[in-house]
Image (spheres, rainbow, N blue to C red):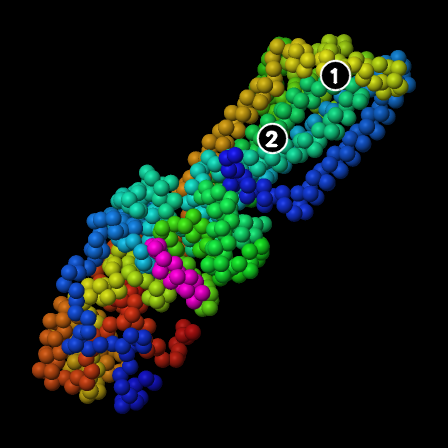
Amino acid sequence: MSDDLPTTPPRSAEPTPPAETVAMPTAPPDPTMPPPGTTPAAGSDGASLAVRVRGLVKRYGTLNAVDNLDMDVPKGGVFGLIGPNGAGKTTTMLAVCTLLTPNQGSIDVFGFDPQSDEQEVRKRVGYMPDFFGLYDGLTCAEYLDFFASAYGLDAATRRRQVDDLLELVELSHKRDTDVSGLSRGMQQRLSLARALVHDPQLLVLDEPASGLDPRARIDLREILLELGRQERTILVSSHILAELEEMCDRVGIIEAGKMLAQGTPDQIRTQMRTSMIVSVRVLGGRAGMEQAHVVMSQRGVTNIVTVRGDTLRGELAGGEEAVADLLAAMVAAEVRVVDFREDRGGLERLFLSVTEGIVR
Amino acid sequence: MTAMNPVLRRELLERWRGRRAFLVITIYTAVLAGIVQLLWLVGRAFLREQVRFGFVDAATGPAMGRYLFENLLGFVLLLVLFIAPGYAAAQIAGERERKTLSLLQVTLVRPWEIVVGKLGASTAWLLLLVIAALPFGAAAFFLGGVTVGDLLRSTFVIVALAVAVAAMSLGVSSITRKTTASIVVTYGLVMLLTLGTLFAAGVEAAMRRFDFDRDTRPIALYLNPFYGLADAARADSFRFSGFELPSVLTPFGAILPDPDFFGNDVAIARPAIEPAFGPDGAVVDDFFEVDPFEDRRRRQPVWLITLSLYTLFGVGGFVIATQRVKPEVQPLIGRRKAAREREARRVAAGVPPVGAPPPGGVMIAPLPEDLPPPPPPPSGPDGT
């Protein structure tokens, strides 16, 4: 149904960011960029990091929830942790929040170890889990006030803080409503306010948008963007990529307890250049396709799939040189190439290209 | 002024606001009043019968006073023993269930502060119940037979026992995952302490062929809260001027060590009774002439032993609870079920099973649109 009109221009598989041709890369790879994988972010040595995780291992029984994970969250901005369910996002976050003792590895949060200096870390970290802890019988204001008192704030500070936070999360009108009477989106916002109650420098948000309707999600995102503009570091996890794409300065892609890549989305894209996705549209019907397939296979393209009857897509290792060689080889073999491109998509593309693609 | 324990403050807010607390106290005092009234009617009828058979000279007041007092104490202890764990058992398991425990753990509140707050809330609740019952106990003062020492000591024993039981319940609450399980286990424990100890004492007595000297009693008895209370209230001294009006504590009083139970009138100083003030007599002397602690004639302070044991248990419960509200500590009861649920979630999420090789490097996964076209419409029998 999609290939009935041969005159239609080829559609990019990914509608959002336009695919670009390999021959004309817009953003030259950053030469200072370290190789992919376990690379720390720039400035990882100094005080510019909010969170520094090295070789984190957490085992549950025989399951390695987190397996030798490194993570560098620089101060300021929003760091997104992307990964499928069970990848180890929550475990990593819990360890940062002092709620979990790692089996191995070290964590440094603003210069403090969550294991030995847990109170110091707790003062600086606000944690919002992926569930809402409900104390029924308390109003929104009392709920926040309770947690503020649990952080040792005095009554006057608490009152001010509760008012400010309710305003920030747009719940001032629900001030005296019982927390059990809130909608999911409101609960989520109140939960965020709770994490902010002691004015932490680092906010750890575990799947903040899960279960929210689009409107509530946009509201939440606006608040997070607002917070990200302040002098605050936000570590946010999600398996919903679109949600992170719009607000993260940096992302870490995590799967099966390992950090597969981290950095700005552009950096990761560059890192991934060693293995690109090429998409080739050829003329000549079936024969042309077979011919192209043969050439691509010879040049080391793997995982070749046919898309829409006239396009072949596959993975090519070896960077831009290899891509150029492939194109040259195809032209030399007189394959009638009409479109040759490297697929470079948004975060989702990035994510799928980095992970095994367990979630879809 | 130091700031109030936030956990205690929240518990009190949650519990004492609104109509429920008001209703509970109203009903509770109404029930107590009804019980005292009923006891009085029954006791009076009893005493009248005895008076008719000839003890006309003596005042019946002290017998009635002691009877009311002991029954009331027994009833309050029973209530408190069943109310204390019911509330405390839900406290920590409830935090787990509502998923608020980790929210607390991530704050600056320390584990022991959480437990202190919870125990404080329990204690406040118990104190209220006991104090609300005190006026009824004081009614006995109009009748005699009871010293202020008896009342203070008994009240103290009831509150202390209840707080200890609450602390034990917190310990149970902290090792269970579900509130219901916690409540079941806790009530089992209370039954063990009230009925189980009696049974164990019976077994021990039978094994020793009921061969006890004046100072030895089955060990399990000392764990029975009513036994301790009977000693604190001196329930073995229920005979006055020949009147017999047994209370719920009388059987426990009868088996206290070194009893004067079957002797003549108990040689304990009592408020002086003036029979001239009518059939129930009246107390005319200053109550405080009787030193509440001086008049102990028993060498073995049973109630102190009982309280020490309960304090030990209570501290144990407190320590367990403090250890168990620390981050990452999993509840002991309900653990296997939790593991099963985790496993189910893991499978549902499609996470590779334990020991699966880690992803062997970067691999390209096809996008949803890249997937091969769906198979032709089902023709086989298995097509759905």
Pointer 2 chain:
B
Instruction: Tell me which residue sits at (72%, 18%) in the image.
Output: B147
Name the residue located 85 percent from the left edge and 25 percent from the top edge.
Answer: B44
Q: Magenta stretch containing residue B362, yes or no? A: no
Location of residue A140 in the rendering, given as x and y in whole percent from the top left corner:
54, 53
| Tag 1 residue | B287
Nearest the viewer among B334 and B111 is: B111
Residue A227 lies in the magenta-colored region: yes
Occupied quadrant, residue B68: top right
Q: Label 2 is placed on what type of residue?
A: Ala
- Look at the image and tell me whether residue A172 can be seen: yes
Q: Quadrant of the C terminus of chain A?
A: bottom left
Among the 4 quarters of the image, the one containing residue B237: top right
Q: Position of residue A264 (x, y in %)?
A: 26, 62
Dot in front, 1 or 2: 1
Label 1 close to label 2 by CB (< 8 Å): no
In the depicted structure, whether residue B184 falls above or below residue B347: above
Identify residue for label 2: B162
Classify mark 2: helix, strand or loop: helix
Return the residue nearer the eye: B16 or A273. B16
Disc 1 or 2, which lies upstream in sequence? 2
| Label 1 environment density (alpha carbons within 10 Å; few <14, some 14–19, many ≥20) | some
Marks 1 & 2 on one chain: yes
Q: Residues within 10 Å of mark 2 (few under 14, many from 20)?
A: many
**A50 shown above or below A210:** above
Span shown in magenta: A217-236
Q: What x and y, as percent, mark residue A51? A: 29, 50
